[in-house]
Amino acid sequence: MDLIPRVQNLVVKPKDEWVKIKGEDTPPMTLILSYAAILAAIPAIAQFIGFGLIGIRVPFLGAYRYPLGSALLRSVLYYVFTLASVYGFGFVINLLAPNFGTKPNLQKAMQLAVYSMTIPFLAGIFYIIPSLGVLAGIVGLYGLYVLYLGFNTPMMDTPKDKLLSYLVVSIVVIVVLMLVVGLILGAVFAVGSVARF
């Protein structure tokens, strides 16, 4: 698998790319290590730059930034938790399969999870300027459409009448996983760990 063409195709023509992906037999750990691990570095590095070097401007309170050690630790934890969340997402898609008339297939479930995160990973570049972080979330919503196209290909061979409910439950799972990551990072790096500049 060539990383750059895969990313480009998932952004520009995801429907066609899912057809190609369905015919591939990539082991789950290869997907995580050779694809997700590379792309998940984009938001992690952007967060390091944004929170550690540029800082956050808070109206009426001034500008704040994390000390470089804290910013680095935050980025590393974000990276690790994000990869764990993507793996967990694929695992849950596979675990839910029998509930939606689908035969479990960890390989295909992991492809759905990993490749649908392409857009949110790329959108993470907005974290370079922390106040633009909301744009990362907005652009990342396109990833939900990419996930829908993956389910609709159909990657998991889900019956059409159960496809939408399977997709909705899967979306709830990834949203919860990402909220948990955000809450953990927020708790670890409370306002007291930033320096005013």
Image (cartoon, rainbow, N blue to C red):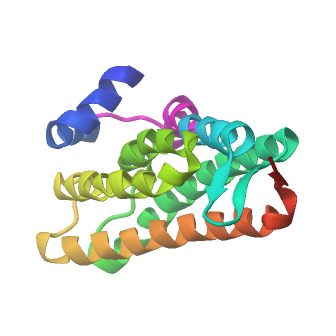
| Residue found at the very far front of the displayed protein | 60
Is 35 a magenta residue? Answer: yes
Q: As rendered, which of 194 and 80 lies closer to the eye?
A: 194
Residue in the image at 48% along x and 43% along y: 126
| Figure label count | 0
Residue 172 is covered by the magenta coloring: no
Q: Is residue 160 above or below residue 109?
A: below
The overriding secondary structure of the stretch rendered in magenta is helix
Q: Quadrant of residue 96?
A: bottom left
Segment tinted magenta in the rendering: 23-40
Query: Percent from the top left, x then y, of residue 132?
Result: 48, 50
Occupied quadrant, residue 177: bottom right
**Foreground pick, 56 / 96:** 56
Would residue 42 appear left or right of 182 to someone viewing this image? Answer: left
Residue at image location 34% in from the left, 31% down from the top? 7
Vertical arrangement, residue 106 with respect to residue 102, above or below: above
Give the x, y percent position of residue 99. Answer: 35, 79
